[in-house]
Amino acid sequence: MQHAKSLFDELAAVGRPLSLEDFNLYIFRGLRGEFKDLVTSLVTKAELLSYTDLHNYLFTHEFLHKTSLPSLAANPSLPPFAHPAQQ
C-alpha cells in the first residue's frame, strides 16, 4: 500500500497526477479475494476515499479477518499488506 502511495506521489511530482478514483481502483484490483466484499461496500460510497481512509479500512478488515486468512495464520510476523496479491 505504501509503495502504491509512493508511485501516486511520484506521478504527481512529475506532472502526471493520477486521480484519487483511479488510485483507489488500482488498489482494489490488486487485493486478494478476501477483500472483495469490502471493495463492493467501498465503491458504493458517494465520496472518494483518501489514502488514509482507504488504508484504515483495509487494515481494519485484515485485522478483523486475519484468523481466517491462511497466509496470515501461517506467518503472523509479516506486516499487513506484505502478502502478495492473488491473481
Image: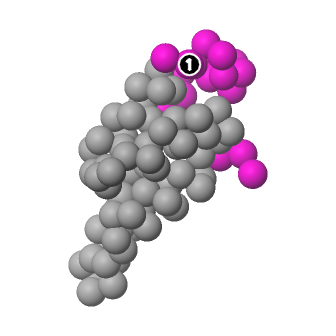
Of the residues shown, which amino acid type is indicated by label 1? His
The answer to whether residue 84 shows anywhere in this view is no
Q: Residue furthest right?
A: 87
How dense is the environment of label 1, judged by Cα within 10 Å: few (below 14), some, or many (20 and up)? Answer: few
Question: Does 29 appear above or below 64?
Answer: below
Q: Which residue position holds label 1?
A: 65
> Residue visible at 29% across and 41% down?
53
Question: Does 67 appear above or below 70?
Answer: above
Question: Does 11 appear above or below 52?
Answer: below
From the viewer's perspective, tell me whether residue 45 is left or right of residue 37: left
In the image shown, does 11 or 32 lie closer to the viewer?
Answer: 32
> Residue visible at 24% across and 78% down?
13
Q: Position of residue 21 (x, y in %)?
A: 39, 63
Read off the magenta span. Answer: 64-87
Q: Position of residue 45 (x, y in %)?
A: 37, 46
| Residue 66 painted magenta | yes
Q: Position of residue 2 (x, y in %)?
A: 38, 50
In the image shown, does 13 or 62 lie closer to the viewer?
Answer: 62
Numbered disc total: 1
> Residue visible at 47% across and 20% down?
63
> Residue visible at 71% across and 21% down?
70
The answer to whether residue 37 shows anywhere in this view is yes
From the viewer's perspective, tell me whether residue 13 is left or right of residue 25: left
Q: Position of residue 76 (x, y in %)?
A: 57, 19
Q: Residue furthest bottom?
A: 15
| Residue 77 painted magenta | yes
Q: Secondary structure at mark 1?
A: helix
In the image shown, does 10 or 38 lie closer to the viewer?
Answer: 38
